[in-house]
Amino acid sequence: MATNQALQIQSFNVPVDALPLQPDLILQAMGYDPKTKQNIPGLLIQEIERFINDAPNHLDIQGGFRQFSPAEVIINKNDILLIDKILQSGRIINGQIKQAESLLVFVCTLGHKYDAWIKSITVTDDMFSTYIIDTIGSELVELAIDWLEKQMIGVHCSRMGVSHSNRFSPGYCGWPLMDQHKIFSFLPPNFCGIFLHDSALMRPVKSVSGIYGLGKSIKKKAYQCSICDKMDCFKRYHQAI
């Protein structure tokens, strides 16, 4: 663990063996019902299990966050003023964190080795395997953030006597993806090994950034998928499971 107390920045290595990745989770992400096992090709299950077993050899998971003081945060109806920058987070997110007293910005990544693994399969034109590895990566990075949230962010909040909201990321709930440039401007360059392109896409690809609301009165609520128009959001299908 690395810490910069002056900026309230902390970074961590996420242990791979702490992530409960199971084949059923990948099947669900692909749109199958693992409970009934109907219409699931046997080869698909075999390949998912094979790649899950191989995945730890291609992971260098890192995550970190920066906490902001209440004096640095103003949450309005449709945006957030964070120090000197306005985050266009929108009414859906702000409705969930309106009782927050401060914010915490986070990032998490599977690392560059996972990108290289995906590329090594993609160049062979094996789209079947590429799809499986890509889906495994998407689920792994979310599990990594779950670990970061529970083991690090949750403990950090408890020590301060506050709670935290759900996590929210640019590109979801109407929050423009380009606001990732503002989020990364508050972090050290290449924080956790992540590089941000001009397009606001991250490298490594399997990386996530976002915010949590912090406060004594804030509660972690269900995501408001019913009022969001992003139909391909991973939170929508996870809540439907």
Image (cartoon, helix red, strand yellow):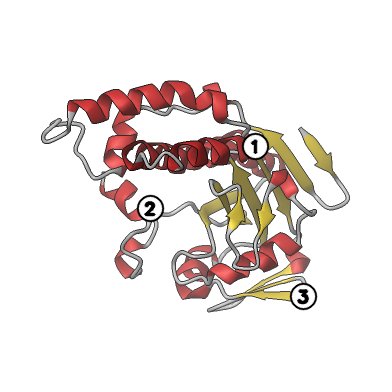
For the N terminus, which image quadrant? top right
Going from the N terminus, do you reach mark 2 or mark 3 first? Answer: 3
Question: Tag 1: Cα neighbours inside 10 Å, few (<14), some, or many (≥20)?
Answer: some
Q: Helix, strand, or loop for circle 3? A: loop
Horizontal side, residue 82 vs residue 53: left or right: right
Measured along the vertical axis of the image, is residue 192 above or below residue 182?
above
Q: CA distance from mark 1 to mark 2?
A: 22 Å
Going from the N terminus, do you reach mark 3 or mark 1 first? Answer: 3
Q: Which residue is mark 3?
A: 84
- Residue at image location 53% in from the left, 54% down from the top: 165
Q: Which residue is mark 2?
A: 235
- The amino acid pointed to by label 3 is Asp
Q: CA distance from mark 2 to mark 3?
A: 30 Å
Looking at the image, which is closer to me, 225 or 95?
225
Task: Identify the image quadrant of residue 126.
Answer: top left
Q: Helix, strand, or loop for circle 2? A: helix
| Label number found at residue 152 | 1
Measured along the vertical axis of the image, is residue 139 above or below residue 78?
above
Residue 141 image position (x, y, % from top left): 51, 41
> Is residue 27 in view?
yes
